[in-house]
């Protein structure tokens, strides 16, 4: 460091005392001491994306529970006041939901929750079955008993979630279990597509109840443990039947 300072051209107006002080400051910088020319480290800034993510999760929960009602229009400022944030992260989260097909943009008004009927739900169930049944049958032949046993806690978690009677709590646990099953395929594209179809199948129907009853959720969760038992036993007929019935009940 000293050689570098000495090799540098010194301006004529710089006095010897100034040069000595400059060298001392340069050496203190090498030792990690603060100098006047040191650029201060900026304080961490909370990223807006984290706020948007929280709002997105909250809006998804409101969709599942029916709190955001199909056909109703909601403005970003009004929802922002409700969540205690500005309209910007709400608007960004709603744009994401619009891409997912949950809402549609209403110019100068806000976002309308898409109205879904029983036919759309049946179509989603059919597509899920076409994708996931063959995968489950293939995995039933190849995945070890030990790997299936590792998923037991997730299946049991869906039973506990169902016992609460909260559709949003159960929906999240349900998605986690199905995602874990499909991850065993090693196909990330399949996992993402199936997750999107699964989430859409959990939105409430127009004219239907905001949520299924506690007994329905418990029965749905029981199919998870039954499916896991069938996969461990490699009983392909039972696996095929349970997966098909599970999607029909979605």
Image (spheres, rainbow, N blue to C red):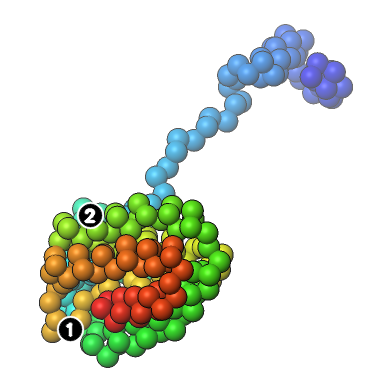
Q: Give percent across and percent down for residue 41.
A: 52, 32
Q: Is residue 89 above or below residue 219?
A: above
Of all residues shown, which one is farthest toward the bottom? 119
Q: Give percent across and percent down for residue 224.
A: 32, 65
Q: Nearer the viewer, residue 93 or 144?
A: 144
- Residue 225 marker: none
Q: Nearer the viewer, residue 225 or 237?
A: 237
Estimate how packed mark 2 is, as few (under 14), some (14 to 19) or many (20 or more) residues with alpha carbons within 10 Å. Answer: some
Which residue is under mark 1?
Answer: 206
Q: Quadrant of residue 25?
A: top right
Q: CA distance from mark 2 to mark 1?
A: 28 Å
Q: Nearer the viewer, residue 154 or 44?
A: 154
**Residue 43 relative to residue 198: left or right:** right
Q: Give percent across and percent down for residue 118.
A: 23, 87
Residue shown at 24%/58% (left/top)?
159
| Label 2 residue SS | helix
Q: Nearer the viewer, residue 50 or 231?
A: 231
Residue shown at 79%/19% (left/top)?
1
Residue shown at 14%/67% (left/top)?
215
Estimate how packed mark 1 is, as few (under 14), some (14 to 19) or many (20 or more) residues with alpha carbons within 10 Å. Answer: some
| Label 1 residue SS | loop
Q: Earlier in the sequence, mark 2 or mark 1?
A: 2
Which residue is under mark 2?
Answer: 160
Residue shown at 44%/38% (left/top)?
44
**Residue 250 relative to residue 139: left or right:** left
């Amino acid at each position: 460091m000293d050689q570098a300072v000495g090799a540098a051209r010194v301006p004529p107006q710089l006095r010897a005392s100034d040069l000595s002080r400059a060298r001392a400051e340069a050496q203190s910088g090498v030792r990690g001491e603060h100098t006047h020319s040191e650029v201060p480290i900026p304080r961490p800034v909370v990223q807006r994306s984290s706020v948007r993510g929280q709002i997105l999760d909250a809006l998804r929960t409101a969709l599942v529970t029916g709190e955001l009602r199909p056909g109703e229009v909601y403005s970003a400022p009004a929802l922002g006041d409700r969540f205690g944030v500005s309209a910007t992260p709400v608007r960004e989260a709603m744009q994401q939901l619009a891409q997912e097909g949950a809402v549609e943009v209403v110019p100068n008004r806000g976002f309308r929750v898409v109205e879904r009927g029983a036919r759309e739900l049946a179509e989603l169930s059919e597509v899920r079955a076409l994708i996931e049944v063959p995968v489950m049958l293939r995995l039933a032949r190849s995945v070890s008993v030990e790997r299936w046993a590792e998923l037991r806690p997730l299946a049991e978690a869906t039973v506990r979630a169902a016992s609460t009677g909260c559709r949003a709590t159960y929906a999240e646990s349900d998605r986690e279990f199905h995602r874990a099953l499909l991850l065993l395929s090693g196909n990330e594209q399949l996992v993402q597509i199936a997750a999107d179809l699964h989430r859409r199948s959990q939105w409430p129907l127009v004219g239907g109840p905001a949520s299924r009853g506690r007994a329905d959720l418990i029965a749905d969760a029981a199919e998870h443990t039954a499916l896991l038992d069938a996969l461990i036993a490699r009983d392909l007929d039972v696996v095929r039947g349970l997966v098909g019935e599970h999607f029909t009940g979605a």
